[in-house]
Amino acid sequence: TATFMIGGDRCTRACKFCAVATAKPLPLDPAEPGRVAEAAARMGLRHVVVTGVARDDVADGGAAHFAATITAVRAQCPGAAIEVLVPDFQDDDRAIQTVLEARPEVYNHNLETVRRLTPSVRHRATYDRSLSVLRKVKAWRGESIYTKSGLMLGLGETEEELVAALEDLRGVGCDLLTLGQY
């Protein structure tokens, strides 16, 4: 297993927990999907995770770039499972569908924190928008895809808030969950 971050090293958001620089991103590199696939093949990976910075500067939020990377990895590593850890794409149906059409096995979008802490932790993201993304993926693809999310612990959340977040994730059909500290 290895994780590849695509879309550059500059993010259009300013989430308080993240170490990625917030700045105007450079244009997407059309050769990047092929390079990721080549690296995954050379490494003999059986599970490839593709994540990326938020690209609110691009009309589709970078969805086509994710899809191209999934397609390239699948071509060079046909037996590998592919997981994407994507931004919310502003909850745009077409962008989410673009990624789904490339057929990742796991669609991961992190809730990151509890409802109360979201505005202070996740700049320009919302708790309900993240839940909506996961709900749509599961509604559109059902049992043919795993949905996954993650929560950071230790940001000041209460046990009751954490349980509520877990219930919210289960309520939208989230299959897999990671809990950790950043």
Image (tube, grey):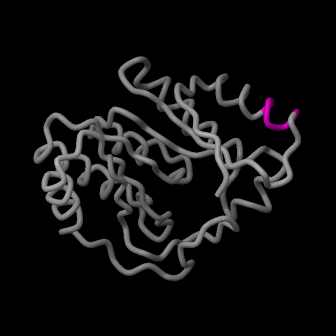
Q: Would residue 162 be counted in the magenta stretch?
A: yes
**Can you give x and y, in whole percent of width and height, for residue 12 in the image?**
54, 72
Read off the magenta span.
160-164
Q: Nearer the viewer, residue 48 or 67?
A: 48
Q: Residue at x 44, y 60 (%)?
A: 61
Q: Is residue 76 above or below residue 62?
A: above
The foreground one among 67 and 33 is: 33
User: Is the residue 169 above or below the residue 15 in the image?
Assistant: above
User: In the picture shown, does residue 90 fall above or below 106?
Assistant: below
Quadrant of res 60: bottom left
| Quarter of the rendering containing residue 151 | top right
In the rendered image, residue 78, in percent from the top left (x then y), is placed at: 13, 37
Tell me residue 31's x, y (percent).
Answer: 18, 69
Q: Is residue 131 left or right of residue 70?
A: right
Residue 10 falls left or right of residue 17: left
* Residue toward you, 92 or 16: 16
Please say whether residue 131 is one of the residues in the magenta stretch: no
Quadrant in which the C terminus appears: bottom right
* Residue at the (67%, 22%) spot, across then down: 171
Q: Quadrant of residue 135?
A: top right
The tally of labels here is 0
At x 19% / y 60%, what residue is drawn? 39
Q: Is residue 65 above or below residue 146?
A: below
Return the residue found at the far top. Answer: 143
The residue at 42%/63% (across/down) is 59
Where is residue 11 drawn, in percent x and y?
51, 72
State the predominant SS element of the stretch in magenta.
helix
- Locate residue 31 relative to residue 66 in the image: left or right: left
